[in-house]
Amino acid sequence: MEGYNYTIWIVLLPFLVFLVVGTGSLRIRPIVAGWIGTGSILITLALSLMCAWNYFGAGAPEGGWQTLIPYDMVWLRFNDTLQVHMGILLDPISVMMLVVISVVSSMVHIYSLGYMKGEAGFARYYAFLSLFSFSMYGLVLATNLFQIYFFWELVGISSYLLIGFYYDRHSAVAAAKKAFIVTRFADFGFMIGILLLSWYTGTFDFATLTSPDGAAIAKAASVSFMGASVLTWALVLIFIGGAGKSAMFPLHIWLPDAMEGPTPVSALIHAATMVVAGVYLVARLFPLYIFGDATALEVVAWTGAFTSLFAAIIALTQEDIKRVLAYSTMSQIGYMMLALGVSGSGGEEGLGYTASMFHLFTHAMFKALLFLGAGAVIHAVHSNLMDGMGGLRRYLPLTHASFLVACLAIAGIPPFAGFFSKDEILAAALHKDPVLFGTALLVAGLTALYMFRLYFRIFWGENKSYAHPPHEAPATMWVPLMILAALSALVGFIPFGEYVSPDRLPHASHLDMSIAITATAVSVLGILTAMWLYRKPSGVPARISGGLGALYRAAYRKFYIDEIYMGVTKNILFKGISSPVAWFDRHVVDGAMNGIGWVTARVSKEIKGLQSGHVQQYALGFMLGVLALVFVFIFWLKQ
Amino acid sequence: MIPGVSLLEILTVSTLMFFIGVYGFVTRKNLITVLMSLELILNGAAINFAAFNKYLYPGQPDGQFFTLFLIAVAAAEVALAIAIVINLYRRILSVDVDNVNTLKH
Amino acid sequence: MEKIIFYILSATILLLSLFSVTSRRLLRSAVYLFGVLSAVAGFYFLIGYHFLGAVQLTIYAGGIVVLIIFSILLTHEIDHQMEQPGLIRSLGAGALCFAGAAMMINLLANNPFQRQELAEQSDINTLGTLLLSSGDGGFLLPFELVSILLLAAMIGGIVIAKYTLGGGKEKNEKPTP
């Protein structure tokens, strides 16, 4: 406990930078703002790594990894029982998240120095990035539900601000609003879940809620509501919040549009860190999910499985490289959710939990790398669309190499990182349910297919002629790419089971050979298919998509989910609810108000003549009044 | 005390005088005649003071003093009012009450 | 004898008051007013308040009426005839005044006035002493207040009369005819 006092600075430093750079964004020079932001995030990277080293380096104590709370203060004191704390909680998953966030955030900060160079609002960009880092650190280090909700909304705000960074572009503004409204809608479920849970347990605190004896939540589990216990309802509602943030079907519609933001932002927020907050939330409350009946976890598992398949199919058809990556992110997060959903409480059963966190970790590395690589490609050819690309491997050798590493990692080819985590997920899924396993395996093949479709169409394929010959990115951009490529290649060898497991006890990781071989074979099949289709320009892809007809068109239009939402919103919400309410407001409420005003105006108009300014009329009125008073009080009332 | 004349008779005269003044005040259009009506009203009140003093409280001359002060105040008021009337006449060439309705604004 | 004089004075007061508020000629109106004020002074003399009567004559009849006549002469042609007030207006005002007078007289007739039987003190010596004494029954404070009021009225009259259209800066500006 003593040695972790510096962790407070991990949270506070980005916040201070946000205040300084944010308030002075118009005065300080852009490059100074960039270096302040980058410098501070590098300090938090050092602190996070130091924290991880201190925490994990000593080995697991007797009885499993401890939960440490270096800071805890009362933030809001409503009364003696209702108090809201703010603090810092260190346990295996929060320390792991610290490492993920600080690494990806540092890489993105450095990368942005080159990518965003010369953009208007450069200082503002760094202020928002710092705000996001602050919120994300606060979120993962939260000690209680209220704090996590607080920072949950803050990351939502940062995401909104960064998606709408190019606020003079109509589509960016629309995307920012969409992201904000959809996640807000989901957060409403989260909030109700928090309220339910804290009402029945009387606490926000994670340590109390997740204590192994389950005393705090027994009450919530015993109360039944509409055929399920209150605990299950609360957990499903909290999962809705997580699903909104993590872009699970059907709340996923904001994520592809969020690609309107600058590409490094997509890498940081919409690929590596914020969107996995939902996974982190479920993992954080995992003992509750285990304690409750199986319903909530099944919801998690099936939502994850469906989303991963659904998103993978859409990713096959998209033309915009950032959108392919966005759907790929959704698919991979679905994978993590699936792994959490199939997990048990400990031992061999708990493999899914470990696998999910492991995949979160590796995915953050190679997905950030993919986005940053895509950013380098966009930087070079000034376009998002794959049609305009081809043969870029000759122009961008470094980007090409790192991108290939990332594709191999996400496809799950040994020895790259994705192989290990994906293998664990598949093993966990097989353990639980063959259908889920089959889905996951299919998704693994599709992942390899759409990633290498992307890869071959960008870097191989037809040699396009470019108006400006593409050139390799500057050092500020390719150095992070190289670092992330090295990490993507190597982090798979971390013995994750030693560190992260639902019962906090170290477990030796081992590869299940039959699953590993099957999965690798499926991935290689996907890669070979992609190679056959896209390595050289050919008419085969067009013929296949033509043959599929309606199915292809549906996938290309993202299965019309956006249209369904718009239809529901327009026809049911706007026409059915909002319009009558607006009519009522305009005609009844406003009408009453206007009526009062009209009556007042008319009456004053009528009696305006009395205020003639003629002294004699006033005197007459005065006399009349006096006589009336005399009459009333002396003659009438005296009788 | 006037032999054979009751207080009520005097008060009746002063009341009538007062209301004649009120009538003039309300009906007259010329500022100067309005002023004159005002004098009638004041005199009606002044007669009352003197009559009460004479008939009801002869031990002290308070009523006379009030009448005196009333005359002094009336003199001051008339002096100011005449100044205003003349100034007004210089401005709008009229002393008609109907033309002086700036109170409206 | 006094009774007859009182009735004559009363008749004079009421009739001349009526003429004064109804006459169409301004100057005649002022002259009628002069008659009313003189009759009131006569009433004061009749009830033995000689000092009051003298003051009424000098200040009211002698001062105020003269001021009013001056102002009439300054602002009107001598033979200017005022228009009559409208019928509705005069009838309405008359009805109102009649009702008010009737109410007041009714009230006065039914009110039992109590007379204090005390020796009368109304000679000029007593008046002068009391007016300048600050003790019991003395009127020094109102006396001083009236002196301040008169001073203020004097200054006010000068300021208002001096005020011209040009803001009072042009000294010898002639009044616009």
Image: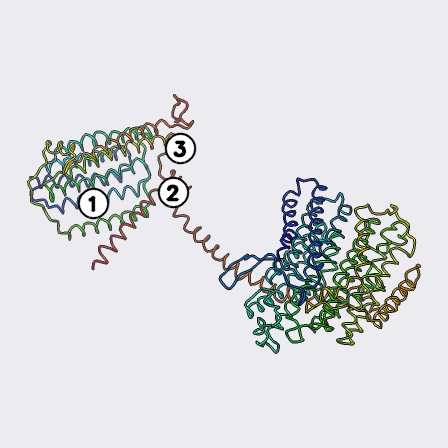
Mark 2 belongs to which amino acid? Answer: Gly
Q: Is residue A118 left or right of residue B38?
A: right
User: Which quadrant: the C terminus of chain A?
Assistant: bottom left
Q: Position of residue A381 (x, y in %)?
A: 84, 49
Q: Position of residue A624 (x, y in %)?
A: 29, 50
Residue at which label 2 appears: A613
Mark 3 in CB contact with mark 1 (< 8 angstroms): no
At 38% across and 31% down in the image, what residue appears? Answer: B93
Q: Is residue B86 above or below residue A570?
A: above
Q: Quadrant of residue C175?
A: top left
Residue at which label 1 appears: B16
Q: Is residue A208 left or right of residue A434?
A: left
Tell me which colouring the rendered structure shows. rainbow
User: Which quadrant: the N terminus of chain A?
Assistant: bottom right
Q: CA distance from mark 2 to mark 1?
A: 28 Å
Q: Position of residue B47 (x, y in %)?
A: 17, 40
Instruction: Provide the chain ID for the residue under circle 2.
Output: A
Mark 3 belongs to which amino acid? Answer: Ile
At 55% across and 56% down in the image, what residue appears? Answer: A75
Residue at which label 3 appears: B92
Q: Position of residue A88 (x, y in %)?
A: 62, 57
Instruction: Provide the chain ID for the residue under circle 1.
Output: B
Callouts 2 and 1 on one subunit? no
Instruction: Provide the chain ID for the residue under circle 3.
Output: B
Callouts 3 and 1 on one subunit? yes
Q: Is residue B88 left or right of residue B40?
A: right
